[in-house]
Amino acid sequence: MHAPQPAKKCGCDGSHKHVPPTPRVVQPPLRGDAAAAIVCQRMKLRLSLAARRQLTSQVSSEHYFARLLTADLDADARKFLAAALPVRRALWWSVLAIHDSLGSDEAEQASRLAPVVQWIARPSDAGLIEVRRQDRKVKRNRLWGCLYQATYAAAGRVSPPERQLVVAPPEMSRRFVAALVYMASVHGGSLGYRERQRRYLLLGQSLANGPAPWSRRSAMVQETT
């Protein structure tokens, strides 16, 4: 049996009404206990020379992340953790960081975060369409636009749900997450940025193990990625 060929991008303008199916959300190749070198290789991480010097062939993701924190290589730690976490946990991490950084804008947050939170808990095509409704209202190169693009990528697609499927590489959503956590860290200005980023790193670290953090109140929602 021949391996399936990856989908090719087409010049579709999005005018057709048919909504193509979203790729099935599958178990990611990496978990928090994977060897750090494998995470870096498969997710094509671009780390600093100092961070690469901390990387040995057998060190676990958990221990490598701890090394980066000890060496105050927080930017590298942010990129690495976004890559090492299961994809929905990584996206959830960015949601928590955004929620914390925009604490005074709760009404706006509720409407803009809700479809992403709902998709994380129960991935579906319908959920992506709700994300798209919010996406149409924002600039794609700003925080909210990046969050919605991260959600599409976490679902396995580059293209929004009403367009023909263009498959996202696995590292794409992780790069968005790392960027989103950075954006949340600097939202309040440069003063206190390092402290906020370190706090978000420790928050992300706490999401690596245990039950799905978005479903602790409901045993009906099970984590698959």
Image (cartoon, helix red, strand yellow):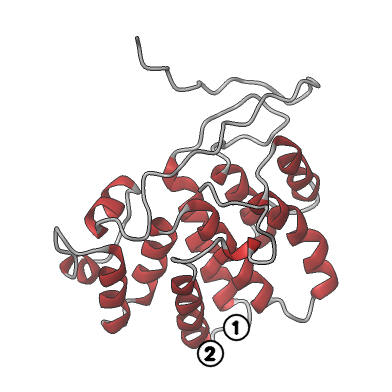
Could you say whether the residue bearing mark 2 is in a helix, strand or loop?
loop
Q: According to the image, label 2 marks what residue?
A: 192
**Do the residues under discs 1 and 2 have CB atoms within 8 angstroms?**
yes
Could you say whether the residue bearing mark 1 is in a helix, strand or loop?
loop
**Residue 5 appears left or right of 64:** right
- Amino acid type at mark 1: Gly
Q: Nearer the viewer, residue 28 or 177?
A: 28
- Amino acid type at mark 2: Gly
Q: Nearer the viewer, residue 148 or 186?
A: 148
Q: According to the image, label 1 marks what residue?
A: 189
- The residue under the point 68% across, 47% down is 122
- Most extreme residue toward the front is 219
- The residue under the point 77% across, 68% down is 109
Q: Position of residue 212 (x, y in %)?
A: 56, 60
- The residue under the point 28% across, 54% down is 40
Q: Position of residue 21 (x, y in %)?
A: 66, 26
Q: Residues within 10 Å of mark 1 (few under 14, many from 20)?
A: few
**Residue 40 appears left or right of 52:** right
- The residue under the point 85% across, 71% down is 107
